Image (cartoon, helix red, strand yellow):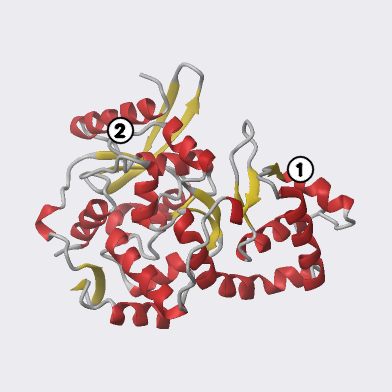
Amino acid sequence: MTKPDIASLRVYNQHLNHDKFKKPEDVVGYMCAMQAQEYTHAKWAIGLRMLSPADKMVEKAITTGTILRTHVLRPTWHFVLPQDIRWMLSLTAPRINAGNAAMYKKQEVTDAIFNKSFDVFTKALQGGKQLTRTEIAAALNQANIATDDFRLTILLMKAELEQLICSGARQGKQFTYALLDERAPVTPAISRDEAVTRLVLRYFKSHGPATVNDFVHWSGLTVADAKTGIEINKTLLSNITIGGVMYWMGADRDFGAAKKSGAYLLPVYDELIIAYKNRDAMIPAGFRDKMGAITFFPTIMVNNQVVGNWSRNMGKKNIDIELKPFNKLNKAQNQSIESAIQRFKKFNGIG
């Protein structure tokens, strides 16, 4: 087995080219968490894994709270399900807070200020209210809590990590916050070991083949956590070794089922790229000097290999797609990419 075979299995296990999901929440539930700070791109990441995707369908799931958006891994924005958000935050928040400690100190945000801000959030949002950042900042300022510089972001993130607030429905193009208790059911608490076991299993089943270091990169947890979770899940996982590196995946996966054909317009920070510390399996050797462009910009993938970047100019009645291949594309590649372009346009209600 070669590294391109690893890429084929990842595409297969992430359901990009087979057995696609019917509902947005089914995608997020299977993937466990999906990076989502670039909002419109993150919606398309869900759409790529759906049978008949539509932006309006994904937006509705987020509006109604079927999918939530919060800081939960590393930390950055992720889509998660309401039934997963509490146990995941209980697992990851302590490490995120420890990593943020210097930032809290630099911005002079003390525990007393945090607690006071939490009271403001609770009072302002209770009763099903959903407020924008501007409205929340006004409520904090009225309580004599400064929100200049980076402080508002810190206060909001800390409240997310403490399971007080999460995403609400958008107001126009503005994001809102709501009380978590009013958006997600209270679920039974589980032990840390059980949470690690759950996260490890779901990551390797949906993202595998992947390494221990890939999991650590994706989750923000430790190597020890990864090894503990693998050991507990050893009957549910299988492994392969390539070039002295061990890769883990679900034990029930069919190695012969992965397909190598097809093209995808991957959004920026798609899980197929961002969820791995080492991305060489998806990137031909000649393009690895372009890692920055691949990591931080939307990418074109053909036959499970990255071949360039792309961008889009969104109009009301049309979408202009600009392809930026790293090398000249052949006729078959262009035809495959054209199908991917049409799928993206259809997702956005055009064509």
- State whether residue 266 appears in this view: no
Query: Mark 1 is on which residue type?
Result: Thr
Residue at point 45%, 67% (across, down): 219
* Residue 13 seen in render: yes
Q: Based on the displayed image, in which of its 4 quarters is residue 218 positioned?
A: bottom left
Q: What is the x, y in percent for residue 77?
A: 54, 54
Label drawn at residue 134: 1
Total count of labels: 2
Q: Secondary structure at mark 2?
A: loop
Residue 79 circle label: none
Marks 1 and 2: CB-CB under 8 Å?
no
Residue at figure coordinates x 37%, y 54% from the top left: 29
* 273 sits to left or right of 70: left
Residue underneath mark 2: 52
Q: How far is disc 1 from disc 2 in space, using C-alphas?
A: 36 Å
Using the rendered view, name the quadrant where residue 111 is placed.
bottom right
Residue at x 47%, y 16% (from the top left corner):
317
Give the answer, above or below, for where 150 lies relative to 240: above
Q: On the rendered image, what quadrant is the N terminus found in?
A: bottom left
For image coordinates 29% across by 54% down, the residue present is: 282
Q: Amino acid at mark 2?
A: Ser
